[in-house]
Image: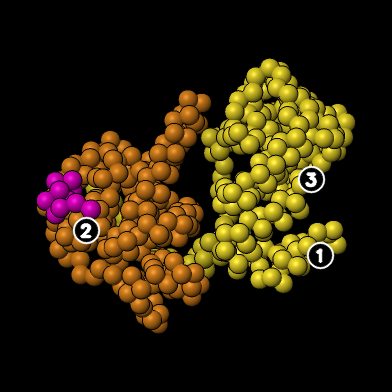
Chain colours: A yellow, B orange
Amino acid sequence: MKLETLIETARADEAVAPSSAARERVWRGLAAPRRSRPTVLLFAASAALGALICFSVIRLVQRPPEAPAVAVVQGAVAPVAPRHVKVEGPAELLLRGPAKVDLGARHVELEEGVARLRVAADGTGTLQVESGTCFLTDAEGRHRVTGTQPLGQQLSEEVALYERGWSQLSADPKGALDVFDALLRRFPNGALVQEARLSRLEALQALGRHDEAARAARDFLNDFPQSERAAEVKKLLEKE
Amino acid sequence: MADTLNVAMASRHSLPLEASAPAHVAFSSDVELVDRCRAGDATSWRELYVEHFDFAWRIARRLGAPEAELEDVAQESFEIAFRHLGDFREGRFRTWLFRIVANVVSARHRARRVRELFLGFWGSAPSPADEGPAARIEARQQLELVQHVLSRMAPKKREVFALCELEGLPQAQVAELVGCSPETVRTRLFHARKDFERACLKRGVAP
């Protein structure tokens, strides 16, 4: 056989022209791809992946359940978000960071570590940081807590603020207004909220801000229709 | 041999690759078709496939893919093309498809050589030139020999040899398909002819 013959035979190769049947078979194969012959690497990769999955499942099953961020020793809390609760009464909590606790006007934020929180009915209590980093946010701002931190009496703070504002109402209605605004921000659900809003209304009247005073009066009556102070507020509203 | 091949090339008159598509299919431009395919138009997928299937098949065969593997090669090439259609930005679709087909065929040649190497260790790798009587080799065996030699050539030389020598394309068109200058095609073709001739001589083919 000569080289020239070989080349001519290759040029005349009939297999270079596909049949219509072949064209349709390949098209059908594209629509439903045929499984290609697995390679050694594909088998190895699949085996490795399968082993990894099995190992992970075994580890997951064997792993002890994760300790909760907020464990309630006694009392009741309301969930706010994952790892974030609100205390609604006397309670004792064991915290594992990260965890957050709302105490009304105060917030506890345990970034990491362990802390124990005890809260009494009047809002007093203790925050004991056993390990890690913990912050307490109150009227004075956010500060880091180490060791055991007593939680101040909320009512006494609220009363002190109210008395301060009340004492300023005649001589300095603007200063009094600022104090009452601060009190309402800090103790939005406090024991003196109605008194503070009524006094604030009086401060607005003393400042000549009658539109705001009327609005504050209407808001008060909407929020506290059965209040003992309602009659007082109506009188003030009639003046506007 | 070079003169013989040159004469044979000059006598060739048709360019099968250019007229391989069925005449009844209405063609759109490559760019329009590809855009419609990207948008998920199933009809356009089919049109693109029909327009370029014969080309892909011919290329695969010319590059030495065994007849029994041509359907697999074509399917694999179009699967790759459809999967990476987003990568086709400019130029001729056929040039882009050529590269895909050539790569698929090269990969199969490599895998086949590895298999034959391992089989050779066990003494069971068949040699195409050993089949049949030494005095007379049928056309099928000749084709297998050509395919065998092509599969062992370096990919760049194989592509140029297959397109110039076997398919009969002008060097300028080959240059566009393989992505090099016509001068480079000429150089590669010179070396490819030498390699092909050497390999055939080793297998008992007369010069």
- Which residue is depicted at the point 65% across and 30% down? A136
| Number of numbered discs visible in the structure rendering | 3
* Identity of the residue drawn at 80% across and 59% down: A229
Disc 1 to disc 3, how far (Cα)? 20 Å
User: Can the viewer see residue B165?
Assistant: no
Query: Is residue B35 at all visible to an observer of this figure?
Result: yes
As shown in the figure, which amino acid type bears the numbered disc 2? Glu
Q: Which mark is residue B176?
A: 2
Q: Is residue B170 magenta?
A: no
The answer to whether A231 appears left or right of A145 in the picture is right
Residue at 74%, 40% (x, y): give it.
A159
The amino acid type of the residue labelled 3 equals: Ala
Q: Amino acid at mark 1?
A: Ala
Of marks 1 and 3, the one in the foreground: 1
What segment carries the magenta color? B179-189
Whether the residues at callouts 1 and 3 have beta carbons within 8 Å, the answer is no
Q: Position of residue A65 (x, y in %)?
A: 78, 29
Q: Position of residue B193 (x, y in %)?
A: 20, 45
Q: Is residue B180 magenta?
A: yes
Q: Between A10 and B90, which is closer to the camera in this rendering?
A: B90
> Secondary structure beneath disc 2?
helix
Residue B75 versus residue B108 in the image, above or below: below
Measured as percent of width and height from the top left, residue A111 is found at 63, 29
Task: Classify residue A124 by image quadrant.
Answer: top right
Q: Mark 3, chain letter?
A: A
Using the rendered image, report if marks 3 and 2 lie on a common chain. Answer: no
Mark linked to residue A231: 1
